[in-house]
Amino acid sequence: MIRRIIAAAFAALALAACSESPEYTPLEEAVLSHIKARVGPEATFKVTKIVKADSLTTGQLYEQRIKAFKVKKDQDTKYYEKYKAKKMEANAEKHKKGMEKDALILKGLEEMRPAIEAKSSEIVCYDYTVSGSAEDKDVVTVFEDFWVAISPEGEVLSTNHTRRGLHKGFGKFLDGYIGLLATAGDLDDE
């Protein structure tokens, strides 16, 4: 149901982006053009509220990555020990390899710390909630607070119906992070 509401909102935003009627702020234009690229122009859309909720800095993003891999390493360790005790060698080996990758990535992240700290206050994105209504033929959908992450340059980086997961995959904004994952053989970014 929520996905249909979001899809309707995206469709409505798309049509509004190409209509001549209202004047939009640069932020609204960025959101509308992002949605227009994803959905055809079948609906009309009205933005009723855009609220800046937060920003994400390079330092915060770095600390999120550190935390994510510590949690992953702890989980792999727990499952390794569990499967080892049950003599399930294939499963234990899988988690042992996971622990080794996690340790390698954490070591690499620690080596990146000085470079990250030098620009830890740089903004990666601003998070906004957007509310409005969409009209498609005979159906009017009112939606509230879908999340949008926008770069300082005004590019929509991601959207989500909740804040959780809005920054998934944002490790790519840390210099050297993707190369670190490739070296560790883990391109899943999580």
Image (cartoon, helix red, strand yellow):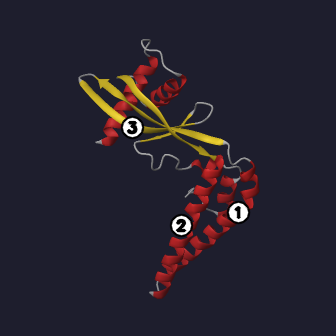
Q: x%, y% of residue 6?
A: 36, 36
Under mark 2, the amino acid is: Val
Vertical arrangement, residue 126 with respect to residue 105, above or below: above
Query: What is the number of the mark on residue 110?
Result: 1
- Sooner in the amino-acid sequence: mark 3 or mark 1: 1
- Sooner in the amino-acid sequence: mark 3 or mark 2: 2
Query: What is the number of the mark on residue 118?
Result: none
Residue that label 3 marks: 145
Q: Circles 3 and 1: CB distance less than 8 Å?
A: no
Residue at the far left: name it: 138
Vertical arrangement, residue 49 with respect to residue 101, above or below: above
Under mark 1, the amino acid is: Glu
Give the residue drawn at x 35%, y 35%: 144
Give how far apart the Cα atoms at labels 3 and 2 are.
29 Å
Vertical arrangement, residue 58 with respect to residue 51, above or below: below
Element class at badge 1: helix
Query: What is the number of the mark on residue 71?
Result: 2
> Image check: 140 left or right of 16?
left
Q: Residues within 10 Å of mark 2 (few under 14, many from 20)?
A: few
Q: Quadrant of the C terminus?
A: bottom right
Q: Is residue 151 visible from the viewing direction of this image?
A: yes
> Image check: 46 left or right of 124?
left
Q: Quadrant of the N terminus?
A: top left
